[in-house]
Image (tube, grey):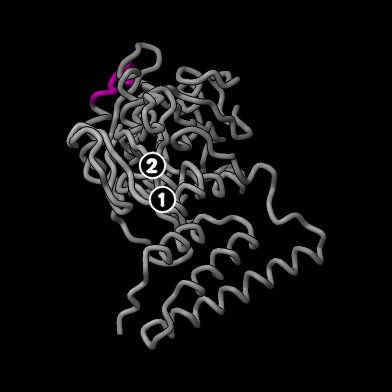
Amino acid sequence: MPANLPPDYHRAEQRYREAISPEDKIEALEEMMRIMPKHKGTDHLRADHRKRLSQHKKELQEGKKKGAKTSSTLDKVDKQGAGQVVLVGLPNAGKTSIVAHFTKAQVEPTDYPFATFKPTSGMMHFENIQIQLVDMPPVSPEHTEYWAFNIIRNTDLVLLVVDLSQPAPEEQVLELTSLLEEKHLLLTGDRETESPDLSTAIKPTYLVATKFDAPNAESGLASLQEEYGDDFPILTLSVQSGHNTETLPEKLFEALHVLRIYTKAPGKQPDMDQPYTLPIGSTVFEVAETVHRDFSENLRFARIWGADKYDGQQVKQDHVVSDEDVIELH
């Protein structure tokens, strides 16, 4: 008998996959169990959740007995802007140079490895929104901070940074993806990829091949595209020469899979400088919920303006919005 799990369950399940602390895992699991329909098709799943819930409660109690904190202050970088993009790469791949070029973050590119020892974030501008870039310590077999994996697990998008000045860049990708898979993090360029189990988080990923101005970079790119061109979108970049620096912000906006919505009061003009950002596929009701909970609770209908709409067209709560629609909530 099929489980027939509703969308709210899958959203809670995603929160569970991305949770870091036992408290957050317990909260997400309890919500999943509340939402889950009660019938024979969910009996096995419910039993599995009870077992997981018991394990997490035990972890929480053991942590309290030891007087230990459940998570480090470095375990999480608060999200800002239209989406959070965490840069992942081996030592000297060019992550810090990207963050320094596109943001005002206080970072200093260096020629020696492991110069970045804590997460540093800055805001990248794209048109009328900002995207958060997070510079991370390198991921490598020799040394990776334990909390780095927690930050990657919680991000909206992974920017996999590969160095074209080094031989065999495809081997850099294999090394990075293998290390992350060991930590139950599966990188993918396909948002439809399903997680093999509850402990594995699927992370949408964009691959940036840096130092495109280096000798033999084109041959390295050819190898990279042959091996991983079907797995990830790939963009070449050179901060030094400016190659594709104007292209990257738009590509990351597209990869975040979000849209911009403007709101207006009746008889007023919309503020086109301050859009709300929501996932692609969002409805009028979800727009109202983002603006304010009271709006969603009392929403009767909306009027909408957009490229493929009649101006002021009346729509219902379940109407799916498009990028740069203007919404008037009633």
Could you say which disc has been placed on residue 329 in the image? 2
Q: Is residue 206 visible?
A: no
In the image, residue 311 lies at what x, y percent? 22, 33
Whether residue 175 is situated above or below residue 65 in the rendered picture: above
Q: Residue furthest top?
A: 241
Q: Front-most of 178 and 316? A: 316
* Residue at image point 36% right, 28% down: 267
Q: Was residue 222 drawn as part of the magenta stretch in this picture?
A: no
- Left or right? Give the position of 47 relative to 258: right
* Tag 1 near tag 2, CB within 8 Å: yes
Q: Quadrant of residue 3?
A: bottom left
- Residue 68 x/y as whole percent: 78, 57
The residues colored magenta run 212-218
* Kind of residue indicated by mark 2: Leu
Q: Please, which residue is most extreme toward the front here?
A: 267
Q: Position of residue 126 (x, y in %)?
A: 38, 23
* Residue at horizontal 63 percent and vertical 34 percent from the top: 118
How crowded is the residue under tag 2: few (<14 C-alpha within 10 Å), some, or many (20+)? many
- Kind of element beneath mark 1: loop
186 or 31, nearer to the observer:
31
- Could you tell me which residue is drawn at 31 percent across and 30 percent down? 251
- Residue 213 lies in the magenta-colored region: yes
Of marks 1 and 2, which one's residue comes earlier in the chain? 1
Disc 1: which residue: 299
Q: Main secondary structure of the magenta part?
A: loop
Helix, strand or loop under label 2: strand
97 up-or-down from 6: above or below:
above
Residue drawn 53% across the image and 35% down it: 80
Asked whether 58 or 310 is in front, the reply is 310
- Measured along the vertical axis of the image, is residue 172 above or below residue 99? below
Q: Quadrant of the C terminus?
A: top left
